[in-house]
Amino acid sequence: MTGGRGYPVAVRAPASLVAVVLALALALVAAGCGPLGPTEQGGDAGDPLAVVTALPSPGELRGPDPATADAADLAEAFTGRPDAELAAVIDDRAPADAAVRTWTSPGGGTLTVAASVWPSHLIATGVGSDLAARLVAEDGAAWTPPDVPGARGARRDDPAEARLGFSVGPNALYVRATGDVGDDVAERAMRRLILVLEGQTG
């Protein structure tokens, strides 16, 4: 998906998420960076509702007010549809706090952002990375925007969709754009989420 106007997730198997988390743990230890223990937060927790509320409505996109989210809400925000299995995985990972916000374009495209706090930096990183990478298995391709260092994502042309994940300490940020909401909109949304979160947590 390319282009866009204004400012501007499918997990099925718990085993897959566990595998991603373990792989990330090994990579962090080998690299000698970040929290070395699987339970370390690696920073302060932000306020998810305040993070998503701080974003202005992008261009002509409009949507309901931001809201706190439970596991089922997060699952739907991540994937675009209700997913009881994913909700169970999320609940098992025990997020401490979460919030979501959605917008819809006049053409029917969507922008969804989510902010969440997890028990550790490792889980926060694994969740976002796994969800974005799932799009690759659905005819997408890996996407790492150069203007959003540290983010991991994927995008697909048909049907158009882009996913982008980022983590800071125990906080996970996630952006999902579909239809005529372009990649540039998703990137801009993520950059603003990061700025707001870093302003909260220092």
Image (cartoon, rainbow, N blue to C red):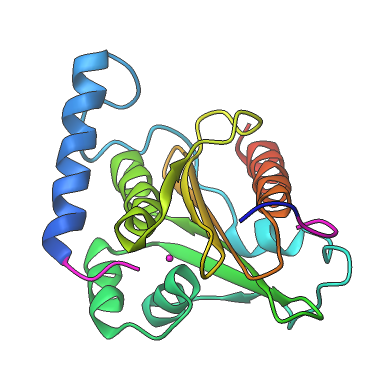
- Horizontal and vertical percent position of residue 37: 20, 31
Above or below 39: residue 202: above
Q: Residue at x 82, y 81 (%)?
A: 106
> Is 165 covered by the magenta stretch?
no
| Residue at point 21%, 46% (across, down) | 20
Relative to residue 121, is residue 192 drawn left or right? right
Q: Is residue 97 above or below residue 105?
A: above
**Toward the viewer: 118 or 13?**
13
Q: Quadrant of residue 54?
A: bottom right
> Going 81% across and 56% down the picture, which residue do you hit?
7
Residue 110 horizontal side relative to residue 73, left or right: right
Q: Looking at the figure, which quarter contains the C terminus?
A: top right
Outermost front residue: 158
Task: Name the one closer to the observer, 50 or 106.
Answer: 106
Quarter of the image holding residue 117? bottom left
Range covered by the magenta-colored residues: 4-13
**Between 120 and 77, which is closer to the camera in this rendering?**
77
Image location of residue 113, percent across then percent down = 60, 63
Magenta stretch holds residue 6: yes
| Secondary structure mostly seen in the magenta stretch | loop
Q: Nearer the viewer, residue 99 or 78?
A: 78
Q: Name above or below for residue 102 compared with residue 21.
A: below
Instruction: Name the image quarter holding the N terminus.
Output: bottom right
Residue beneath the point at 50% across and 31% down: 150
Number of disc labels: 0
x, y percent for residue 132: 41, 53
Q: Is residue 112 above or below residue 42?
A: below
Residue 38 on image: x %, y %? 20, 37
Along the horizontal axis of the image, is 158 left or right of 170?
right
